[in-house]
Image (cartoon, rainbow, N blue to C red):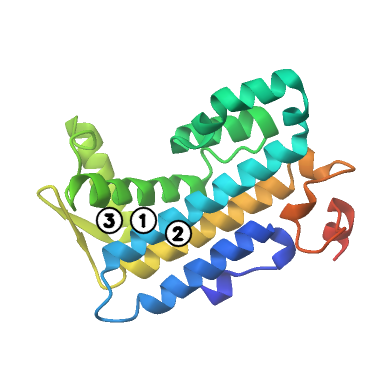
Amino acid sequence: MGAERKNFNDLTTSGESCLTSLSRLYLLSGEPTVNPEWILVDAVTAVEVHVDRTIEALVADSGISSLLVGGAFLSRYAEEMSRTWDARYEWLADGFEVKMRGEKAQQDFQVLVECRNAIVHGSGHLTRRQRSSLGKFIQLRKQLKSVLDIDVHGTVIVFSRNSARVSLRVASSFVHGFDRTVLESPQMQGPQPAQHLLHHKGQTADNRTQS
């Protein structure tokens, strides 16, 4: 994990905080008494919190809430922005030109989300939705193995010794890719980027690039 923590100028303040949380989980994952399922669930939660914080910051700095119609829009639809991962990606892409869907980091992270759903909603079994068709079941089983080193016995997910730490690396890669996309977005490249997403007070897109 430490080697994956690239130049902090490629991270938002929220992203740096998220990676710190993931690093703590990485240390815990080496403890024999720690349940790897708990590590994976907490990793996905940490990334969700980070992405939601970033969306809130982008919305706040867009100025939309200062308009009467914008305030009414947000009061009605704000919760919809973070209801599902599909909703997050749609709002980010349509509202801020932050496009992550289809990137390898996003695809791998989606496998992590699916595994979290199996743990939380299926009590460690693939959920009814995840096995609603044979094709979907086979594809997810292959993805769990290739991306997270997790096997599926029947419908039960089975962690290997490495699965927890592999999951944390997937989460970390997503955070790096997401933050880089956010910082390269039009709103952050403009004359007044969302300052509280940056590491240094007053730091702009220009001197981020030069540093």
Q: Amino acid at mark 1?
A: Val
Q: Are marks 1 and 3 in contact (CB under 8 Å)?
A: yes
Q: Position of residue 25 (x, y in %)?
A: 42, 71
Residue 90 quadrant: top right
Mark 2 or mark 1: whose residue is earlier in sequence: 1
Q: Is residue 71 above or below residue 121?
A: above
Which residue occupies 61% across, 35% down?
A: 92
Local crowd size for mark 1, using a 10 Å CA cut-off: few (<14), some (14–19), many (≥20): some
Which residue occupies 19% across, 36% down?
A: 131
Residue at the extreme bottom of the image, as rendered: 31
Which residue occupies 70% across, 23% down?
A: 70
Q: CA distance from mark 2 to mark 1?
A: 8 Å
Q: Is residue 23 left or right of residue 208?
A: left
* Residue labelled with disc 1: 147
Q: Is residue 148 above or below residue 67?
A: below
Secondary structure at numbered mark 3: helix
Q: Quarter of the image for the C terminus: give it.
A: bottom right
Which residue occupies 65% across, 68% down?
A: 6
Labelled disc at residue 145: 3
Closer-to-camera residue (126/123):
123
Local crowd size for mark 3, using a 10 Å CA cut-off: few (<14), some (14–19), many (≥20): some
Residue 29 quadrant: bottom left
Q: Is residue 121 left or right of residue 102?
A: left
Q: Are marks 2 and 1 in contact (CB under 8 Å)?
A: yes
Q: Amino acid at mark 2?
A: Val
Secondary structure at numbered mark 2: helix
Q: Amino acid at mark 3?
A: Lys
Labelled disc at residue 73: none
* Residue labelled with disc 2: 170
